[in-house]
Amino acid sequence: MAEFRTGLEGKPWYMGVALGLAVAAIIYGGVHYFSLKGQRAELARQESRLGELQRKIQEGRAAQAALPRFREEVRQLELELDQLLRILPARRNTQELLRRIRALTEQGDFNLLRFTPGGEIDRDFYSEWPITISLTGTYHNLALLFDRVSRFSRIINIEGLKLDGRNAGNHTLSASFRAKTFIYKDPPPEADAEVAP
């Protein structure tokens, strides 16, 4: 039978132990490296995911900290919108406008002869709504009427004023004009969809 020789004959025993430990360490390291390679890749993926989640948590905390400020901004914008809708309402409110004009004519001692709402004229984001008005009264009261109309919260422009003093009866003059007011138009739904992205 052949003898197996390691080349360590005649050498001290601890060299054999050191060589055995070195070979065992190499084998253990190789097995450990190759068996844990997949686990290391999974660990790297999980650490990357953890970093992403921590980033999202930080963004969420920043958004949460800014939430009271955003709520205050929304509240302010809603107040501004409410004020703007008084100036440029979304409805015609014919009865209310007629009641207010009639009250002004009664305060100013006018005879309201005609109050004829016209058709709406579409513009970009609003519609013009002309109303033809004819009345008789004094010049001074007519100036007061226009002053009071200018103080309405709703925008009303006076156009095409015609004054005539011939057929006014007991009053100083007759006046006819077009009071033009405006109505806010909501954007069509497809326009909202285009703005959304």
Image (cartoon, grey):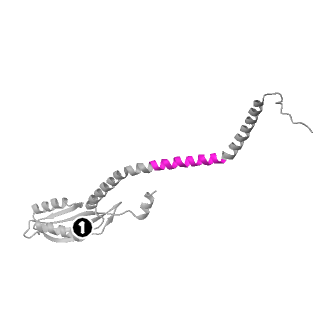
Residue 145 occupies which quadrant of the picture? bottom left
In the picture, the quarter occupied by the N terminus is top right
Which type of secondary structure does the marked residue at label 1 adopt? Answer: strand
The front one of 117 and 167 is: 117
Q: Measured from the top left, where is residue 170 in percent x and y?
A: 7, 69
Question: In this view of the protein, which residue sits in the foreground, 4 or 75?
Answer: 4
Give the residue at x 11% y 63%.
141
Does 190 appear above or below 53?
below
Is 42 placed left or right of 169 in the picture? right
Residue 2 horizontal side relative to residue 145, left or right: right
> Magenta span: helix, strand or loop, mainly?
helix
* Amino acid at circle 1: Ile
At 23% from the left edge and 71% from the top edge, which residue is drawn? 95
Between 31 and 188, the one lying in front of the other is: 31
- In this picture, which residue range is highlighted in magenta? 38-58
Q: Number of numbered discs present? A: 1
Which residue is tagged 1?
A: 131
Residue 152 lies, in percent from the top left, at 20, 61
